[in-house]
Amino acid sequence: MISIRSIALSCIVVIAFVAACGDDSTPTPADPPDASVPLKCDPGLTLCVEACVNTESDPTHCGGCGNACATGEACMGSACTAVCQIDGQQVTDGTVNAANACEQCLPTTSATQWTPRADGTSCSAGQVCSAGACSAKCFIGGEFHAEGTPNPENPCEVCVPATSTAQWTPRASVPLLVGGTDIAAQGWTPVMQAPNTLTYGADHVRLATSTNNGGRTSGQLLITRANALDATKPFKLQVTMQVESVNTHNSLDSGAAILGSFTPPFGNSMDRSQMIYLDSAALGWSDDTQSAAFPVTDGSYHVYELAVDAAKVATVSVDGVAKLTRNNFTATGTIAIGDQTNDANVDGAVRIKSVERICP
């Protein structure tokens, strides 16, 4: 006879078996979300058409839902901005080419290539754009000028890009002669008679004359420069020169001279009377109205200055020290330097380093 205890144990085994079999059954699917609950976006995002987007950069919803950018535009800072696509890179409108400061992105001109910037645009310190390239020039009045070019309307102004690329720069003086450089190319014309030599050193031009043995005349070598100054206005000339040797002058003649006025071909009586003669130990006016002692042939360069004021008073200075004065100085605009005479045994040798007209 089966006991009650045995029957109870059998029932427990059956119930456990049924439960174990239930673990292998397929789970019941979860219920779908309630469509009535709105979608929430993370901070900084906006819900547009059931999607969370960044309206600061999304080209379909730029600045707000549905605000789509046009072709060739990108969304930047919530605004549609024109861009270039150059060499596979997106470039913002107006961006300057890092490899060439004279090119920039201008989508309205080209969305696929760099566009040259306008001529005269500053591209770096002391440089402007010229035909798409950066160069040291001045761009004044719609025209390019190379560095060192003087203002055609005022020689006392010059192009100095390091100072200004858009305006003329004042300068202290106008160079009329630079030693070591061909004088003809600088506008000088020689007046000469043999025997003479005109040679060049690294920083000077050398003029020398001599007299042949028994000769009744001597060599002559005078270099002249037309339009060196405005004869109607005050002017100041500086000649940096070394007198190597010179014979004593004759009245109105000199083997080493500076003429603040000159009338071709040889200078008239007025030019010669107000000429500055240079002897070995003195200088003076060639009409012998005034002279001053000075060691002219001491082997050194000296700055000889002729200044004429509005009252036509002329002052001659050497190395900044006044030596001679003269009233009623008459200028022609042409100047001359060198051996002005063919008188026998009135010769000289000079080295001219520079001639300048000082700017007011």
Image: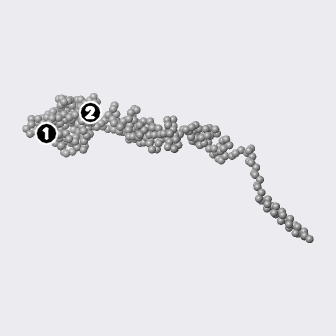
| Disc ID at residue 210 | 1
| Furthest residue in direction right, as rendered | 1
User: Is 8 positioned to the left or the right of 243 in the image?
Assistant: right
Q: Can you give x and y, in whole percent of width and height, for residue 304 in the image?
A: 23, 39
**Amino acid type, callout 2:** Ala
Q: Can you give x and y, in whole percent of width and height, for residue 285 in the image?
A: 18, 34
| Quarter of the N terminus within the rendering | bottom right
**Amino acid type, callout 1:** Ser
Q: Secondary structure at mark 1?
A: loop
User: Is 359 positioned to the left or the right of 294 in the image?
Assistant: right
Residue 151 in view in this figure = yes
Measured in 3D between alpha carbons, the distance from the residue under mark 2 to the one under mark 1, in whole angstroms, is 28 Å
State the residue at coordinates (49%, 43%).
Answer: 87
Residue bearing the label numbered 2: 228
State the residue at coordinates (79%, 60%).
Answer: 21
The one nearer the camera, 311 or 147, is 147
State the residue at coordinates (51%, 35%).
Answer: 108
